[in-house]
Image: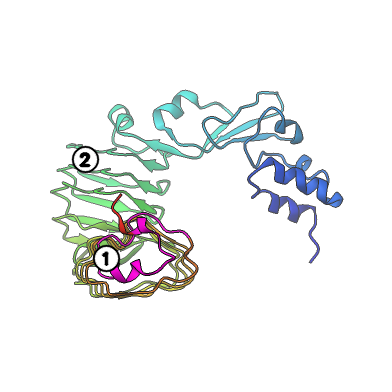
Amino acid sequence: MKLGYNEIMITSMYFDDIKDFINLEIGIKRFQGNMERFHFNPIPLNEHSRKLFPNIETFHIYNEKDEEFDDRRVFKYVIWYLVSYSEYLKKKEKWSVYKNIEYTYEDRNKYGNTIPSEVKSLGYKCFYNCDSLTTINIPSSINKLGNYCFDACKSLKSITITTSVSGIGDYCFSGCSSLTSMNIENLQFISEDRIFMNEPVLVSIEIPDNIQIINGKNIFKKDINKFIIPSSITKLDNYCFRYCSTLTTINIPSSISKLGSECFRQCKSLKSITIPSSISELGSWCFYGCTSLTTINIPSSITSFVRGCFYKCGCEEELMKNERIPRKCFEWW
């Protein structure tokens, strides 16, 4: 297959450094002028690299410290870094687009309990101790609920979580003593202690103490001892199976590429696990406290090990004999 101008332009969009763009044009004469074809900057630019992209009309600002250029050739700015809703209202301009707006605790106190349509995530303790909140629908624009997001919302009775939500923070519904009903559009499984949801990343949340109804039906909490992960899942997120004390065995399909931090922490009944070669990374404290775990394979695909991933694990002594595994894997800090 012969690469044309359009194909090489699409490929170069994923370059990380201006040197890659320069080397492409120097090394292959046929692709000279590639940078001139861009009408937006695919990477952050400085005063020197800006001159190499002369036809930019839409300027992307990826990080807060990126240089901005007001040279009358740019008609639109796209902001990718995280900004609070209040900051967005102060800075927004006619031609600007903000991709990552967070509704913070301060924003909610100032602007109320209705989540603005521009917001993409709910921040740390966003609705913390909000006694007036009795029900809430999470709009489809939201992709993340921060840590302690609805902590101590004692009057909250029902909540709807849409399929757009792919991240749920720690203790998100802690202290929601009136919460009896939840609607979860991408429900995978309900265990004795946790609700599993979302594709392609499998995440879980602790079941609030008083929850009785999920998706309009009385819930039946299953006592997990075996869990089969759907092959459509590509990652197990942080804390996914943490404290699942009854889990004895689990099948991890080859579609999984990463196990998140504390993914199986304190799964005290987990006896064996097979890690497929598709996985290249184990999160920190991934198997911490798995005291019954006696059989685990470490595929050669795992080349980087993080601290504490086998701390207080049942097969700790055996794994220490593996020269590939550094000492830090068996240390808390």
Q: Position of residue 252 (x, y in %)?
A: 39, 72
> Which is the main secondary structure of the residues drawn in magenta?
loop
Disc 2 marks which residue? 133
Determine crowd level at label 1: few under 14, some 14-19, many 20+ residues with C-alpha closer than 10 A.
many
Earlier along the polypeptide chain: callout 2 or callout 1?
Answer: 2
Q: Amino acid at mark 2?
A: Leu
Quadrant of the rendered image containing residue 299: bottom left
SS assignment at label 1? loop
SS assignment at label 2? loop
Viewer-proximal residue among 218 and 240: 240
Residue 320 in view (yes/no): yes
Q: Residue at x 26, y 38 (%)?
A: 127
Residue 139 in view (yes/no): no
Q: Residue at x 47, y 65 (%)?
A: 302
Task: Specify whether residue 4 is painted magenta.
Answer: no
Left or right of 297: which side holds 11? Answer: right
Query: Which image quadrant: the N terminus?
Result: bottom right
Q: Is residue 3 above or below residue 174?
A: below
Disc 1 marks which residue? 313
Q: Position of residue 313 (x, y in %)?
A: 26, 65
- Of labels 2 and 1, the one closer to you: 1
Quadrant of the rendered image containing residue 271: bottom left
Identify the mark at residue 95; answer none if there is no mark. Answer: none
Q: Amino acid at mark 1?
A: Cys
Q: Write the start and end of the magenta stretch as one range.
A: 304-329
Q: Residue at x 66, y 39 (%)?
A: 41
Tally the numbered discs: 2
Q: How far apart are the alpha carbons under marks 2 and 1?
A: 42 Å
Left or right of 53: which side holds 238? Answer: left
Q: Position of residue 39 (x, y in %)?
A: 71, 39
